[in-house]
Image: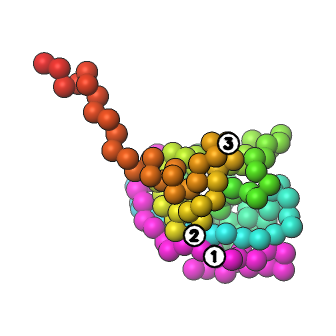
C-alpha cells in the first residue's frame, strides 16, 4: 500500500496497518472507497502531524476544494492519539476524530490493528465501538402499527 509506505519518514514510524476494506460512499460520490488504518509512532504534536499527512495527500494528487463528501485520491485522518483528546482553533483537527464512533469503514480496519485502544471521551475500546456500530438496530415500533 503506497500510502502506508509514504507515512514512513524520519520522524514517523508505522507499527501496524490493517488490511484494506471497501466501503460505499457517504454523500454524492458514486464509487467505492478503500479504507485502512495504521498505528504510527511520532514525537510530532497533532497539528504538525496533520500538516505532514496533508503533504502526503497533496503528493498523491489530492486537491482541497473546500467541498465535503467528494471523491478524493487520498484522505488521511488522525483518529486517536496517545495523549487523549485534542482540540484547538483548527476546525480540521479534533481528536478523537468526530466520525470515529459512527463510521463502520473506520472502525473495521481500526479494530483489526488496535481493538483494545480506548476512545478517550467514552472510555470504550475500538472493539466495543465496532460491536455497538454493528449491533442490529432496534425495530421502529411505530412503523409496525397498522
Query: At 83% across and 42% down in the image, what residue appears?
Result: 88
Figure check: 49 above or below 28 = below
Mark 1 highlights which residue? 16
Query: At 17% across and 20% down in the image, what residue appears?
Result: 145
Colour theme: rainbow
Alpha-carbon neighbours of circle 1 within 10 Å: few (<14), some, or many (≥20)? few
Query: Where the N terminus falls, by quadrant?
Result: bottom right
- Tell me, yes or no, if residue 100 can be seen here: yes
42 displayed left or right of 19: right
Range shown magenta: 1-28
Query: At 55% across and 47% down in the image, what residue appears?
Result: 101
Figure check: 107 above or below 143 = below
SS label for mark 1: strand
Which disc, if any, is residue 109?
none
Percent x, y for residue 35? Answer: 51, 65
Check if mark 1's residue and mark 3's residue have beta carbons within 8 Å.
no
Residue 93 magenta-drawn?
Answer: no
Check if mark 1's residue and mark 2's residue have beta carbons within 8 Å.
yes
143 displayed left or right of 146: right
The answer to which image quadrant residue 122 occupies is top right
What is the CA distance from the residue labelled 1 to the residue labelled 3? 24 Å
Mark 2 or mark 3: which comes first in sequence? 2
Percent x, y for residue 48? Answer: 84, 60
Check if mark 2's residue and mark 3's residue have beta carbons within 8 Å.
no
What is the CA distance from the residue labelled 1 to the residue labelled 2? 7 Å
Mark 1 or mark 3: which comes first in sequence? 1
Query: Where the C terminus falls, by quadrant?
Result: top left
Figure check: 77 above or below 102 = below
Which disc, if any, is residue 121?
3
Alpha-carbon neighbours of circle 3 within 10 Å: few (<14), some, or many (≥20)? few
Mark 2 highlights which residue? 113
Amino acid at each position: 500500500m503506497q500510502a502506508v509506505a509514504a507515512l514512513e519518514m524520519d520522524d514517523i514510524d508505522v507499527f501496524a496497518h490493517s488490511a484494506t476494506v471497501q466501503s460505499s460512499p457517504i454523500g454524492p460520490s458514486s464509487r467505492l472507497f478503500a479504507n485502512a488504518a495504521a498505528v504510527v509512532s511520532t514525537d510530532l504534536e497533532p497539528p504538525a502531524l496533520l500538516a505532514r499527512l496533508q503533504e502526503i495527500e497533496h503528493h498523491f494528487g489530492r486537491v482541497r476544494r473546500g467541498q465535503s463528501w467528494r471523491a478524493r485520491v487520498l484522505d488521511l485522518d488522525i483518529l486517536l492519539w496517545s495523549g487523549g483528546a485534542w482540540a484547538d482553533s483548527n476546525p480540521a483537527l479534533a481528536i478523537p476524530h468526530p466520525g470515529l464512533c459512527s463510521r463502520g469503514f473506520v472502525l473495521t480496519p481500526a479494530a483489526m490493528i488496535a481493538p483494545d485502544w480506548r476512545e478517550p471521551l467514552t472510555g470504550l475500546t475500538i472493539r466495543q465501538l465496532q460491536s455497538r456500530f454493528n449491533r442490529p438496530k432496534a425495530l421502529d415500533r411505530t412503523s409496525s402499527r397498522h
